[in-house]
Amino acid sequence: MPVYRLLLRLFPPAFRRRFGDDMADLFADSRRRARREGAGAVARLWIHTVGDVARHALAERRHARHTSPVSGGPVWRSILQDVRHTGRGWRHRPGLTAVALLTLGLGIGANTAIFSVVDAFFVRPLPYPDAGHLVGLYSTNTHYPSDRSVETAADVQYWRDHATSLRALAAMSGGTVTLTGRGDPTPLRFVTTMPEFFEVVGVQPAMGRPFTAAEARADEHVVVISHGLWVDRFGATPTILGQPVRLGSVTWRVIGVMPAPFALPADVDLWMPFDLARALPDAWYLSAVGRLKPDVTVDDAQQDFDHMAAALAAGAPKTRKNRGFQVIRLRDDLAWGLAGGLTLLQAVVGVILLIACANVANLLLAQAVVRQREFGVRVALGATAGRLIRQLLTESLVLASGGALLGLAFAAWGVGLLASLAPPTVLRRSVDLRIDGPVLAFSVGLTVVTSLVFGLAPALLAVRSSRTAPLGHGGRSTAGLTWARHQRLRASLVVAETALAVVLLTGGGLLVRSFGQLMAQTPRLRTDHLLTALISLPAARYETATSRQQFFATLVGRLQAVAGARQVVASNGLPYSNWEWQSAFLVRGRTGHVASAGIREVSGGDYFEALGIPLLKGRSFAPTDDAAAPAVVVVSDVFAAQFLSGADPLGQAISLDRGKTWRTVVGLVAATRNLGLDEDLRAEMYIPLVQDLAPPATMLIAVRTTADPVGFGPPLRATVASIDPDLPVQALKTMDQLIGQTVADRRFFMTLLACFAGLAALLAATGLYGVMSFLVGQARRDIGIRIALGARPAQVQRALLAKALAVVGVGLGLGLLGAWWLASLLASQLFRVTAHDPVTLVSVSGLLLVAAVVACWLPSRRSLHVDPAIVLRVE
Amino acid sequence: MPPRISIDAFLPLKPVAFQILMSLADGERHGYAITQDIAGRTSARMRLEPGNLYRALRTMLDDGLIEESERRPAPDLDDERRRYYRITALGRRVAAAEVARLELVVAEAKTKKWLRAR
């Protein structure tokens, strides 16, 4: 909305006062309608709107001028005159103006869109009072300096008793819980947190009240819910307070609703009481947020926490030697891990804007040559150099503003696109991207700077040449010196934009190559026709090992009977599911060798056959491997290579309980991955679920289907409901989707960067085309003379092409140097591709050269049709 | 005696102005309702953006074809801030004159052979 309000400023003030509100209303209605139709409709609306405002605001201004006395001093009036002059100029050169506007629009639009993300994380104040005093509190370990971890209750208690820098702190831990009794069972994110939480963040529930210390101590089932949950699930009923909600199998009472924008921690829907005194003291599961005392800085607080860490280490040197604490501004905490990528993207779009500026500067330089006569006339009529520069800069500013308006329309569309394309790991659901005050200020500032960058050089050159150009001539033949300067400046602009485009193309190319390498990895299992789901049994209702084993045995049995299921297995881990359990183990005969490896407990049919994991040696599990039978284990080839070095794995014995019981290795299978395609193959052990005394409560189900796996979702849900209607089926995904998810981040960054690189190349090629067209136009006389003297037209064309491509070659060389130097910035994003990958560098150079040849060749064809007789006669 | 305004000076009416007069002929409306009415009547062939609509309204207000209405629906039925417009007596006469003019044009056109339906 602020964008439209800004556009309305183009109308005369009186008109705006009279109709502005109604117009904004009308626009808001159209926008609501367009949003329902999708991003395309919104983009169309913005394009129509910009056109509508531009046309009618100008007309209204003209009308207002004729009906009211002219106001303002002479400077104001002469600037207005310049603006009007610019408008007339645009009408005479519609093609050039359109190219310049579009170029600037793309540049400013890309910058504005990316800055809206920067704004959401780093500029816009957090929606908490005095948010600068809010900090996140973490535990660190000198062994893993780039990492930070959650805290133990004992440490939090120590902070609470000893910290001098904090006014208050609140620890919390989160998870998901199932909302039942209201439509489909839905998993919701919750945190349990100390009653001080609301005091720390400084936000109280919009309705109702927070929970009290007494309620936390008494472990009362009271809950504060998010505004979103209240609206979505409770129809925003005003009588929500005191109402019961069923979470899992427990009934809670709603005592408060948080205000709409409140989202701390991100995407949480439920806040429940937590009593620090009753927490497990030494388990690492708490995160904490604190509020600094009024005159304390983050650095002061860090010192305070360093002192506490030192005091604790002095008391227990053995266990606490490497441990420390970290105090981090809450804003930085929320944007953790994002700053690097964002800086890179902002730099990339900045480069695109530079290329756009170089392009427009080149176009204006071309114009300056054409308009030399006009400037000469104005100087002869008494215009001062300052007046001329002001006119040209006004023209640039008007041009940049036009580009900025177009850019805002692009940005409004781009922001929507960003929000919908970004995977949730990059942009959380609660991040609100919008074009607000700071973003607008950014683009206005950018517009002014941009207009200076592309406008100053042409303006200065125009003024200089207007002094030397006599009135009677077209100018160029006598103003040789200035002409040469023009040419040099234009050539260096082409060199610069070519070099910048090469750098961006190399970056984009490296990411594309690296993604190609990633997708070329074999997944190590059969991914087609495979549906997976996660089922988590609530501990309250499935307390015993047998009840859990029984549940999964029943589920697998019933699923196998459903039409469309070929094979069904259940396991506490599946490849690419990001669910993994590790277990320490001993190998018999290797004393002292304790190591840890991934462990998967499987039940149901043949796990390896069902998932398509090759069995290399021995056998898979059989139904006879039950609780009463001798304990068995299957290991992966990586496990065998790493821990059973060389010897035949079959028949060896492995213990998972420090040597109390031993399991015989009965099979060897191919290793898989757990997190993603970029991961190394893993050392894994597999055991039958029935042979574990403490089976996990959370299991993954995999169904190999006969038809489209997505179609098996409803029968799977129905089968689970037939056993336990309150149990949600979570993370229902096909194996292809699971693998797709693991590469979503890379795919997103690659797509963004590749698009920007493509845009840069396109802009550079456009610029080249413009320069070449102009060159051919200006060189008509030379060409005419040469042809008259007997040169063949094709020779002339070749000479022109060679001249242009020499300039491109210099740009390419510089660009490759820059790319070589800068590519290491991308190293962390690359997979099996070095930052100086020759394939990428060669293909980028090839691509750019092809584009350059086409961009130069098209206009150079015109030189073939120069008729020397005509050209020379005109001259 | 006020100078008599010549109706003919307004003719031919711009299509936008004519459509707005037709909308207001049925009763008072605010801007949004006018665009909806016109879009409905012309099967969305004429869509008015805010700039276009309000400039036309401003011109027509200045010309006295329409005026702002001091009446408005009960506050709970509508947005307080919205302005309502209604057609003036002059506006009705101009609209009628435009219809008569168009009828003449159409009748004339129909006598031409090349326009007749086969």
Image (spheres, rainbow, N blue to C red):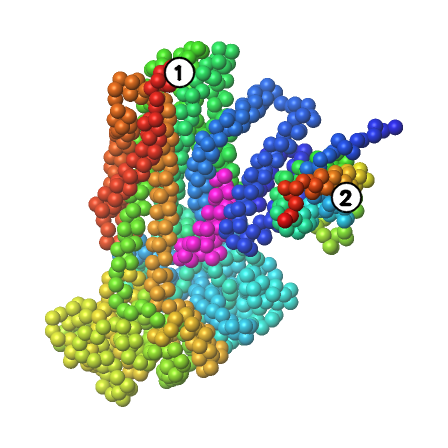
Q: Residue at x 50, y 57 (%)?
A: A263
Decide: is A250 above or below A381: below
The structure residue drawn at horizontal position 56% and vertical position 67%, both measured from the top left corner, is A233
Residue A214 in sight here: no
In front of the other: A479 or A1? A479
Question: CA gap, disc 2 to disc 1?
Answer: 64 Å
Task: For mark 1, name the chain.
Answer: A
Dot 1 surroundings within 10 Å: few (below 14), some, or many (20 or more)? few
Q: Circle 1 sits on which residue?
A: A874
Front-most of residues A839 and A256 = A839
In the image, A374: left or right of A587?
right
Q: Which residue is mark 2?
A: B86
Q: Please, which chain is the residue tagged with disc 2 on?
A: B
Write down the quadrant of residue A277 in the picture. bottom left
Place of residue A642 in the rendered image (x, y in percent of width and height, measured from the top left): 17, 67
Q: Quadrant of the N terminus of chain A?
A: top right
The label nearer to you, 2 versus 1, is 1
Q: Which mark is residue A114?
A: none
Q: State the residue in front, A655 or A110.
A: A110
Counting every numbered tag in the picture gives 2
What are the residue bounds of the magenta stretch?
A406-435
Q: Residue at x 23, y 69 (%)?
A: A671
Q: Are marks 2 and 1 in contact (CB under 8 Å)?
A: no
> Tag 2: residue type?
Arg
**Residue A518 place in picture, x, y as percent:** 28, 57
> What residue is shown at x 54% (from left), y 44% (from top)?
A46
Residue A420 magenta-highlighted = yes
The quarter of the rendered structure image containing the C terminus of chain A is top left
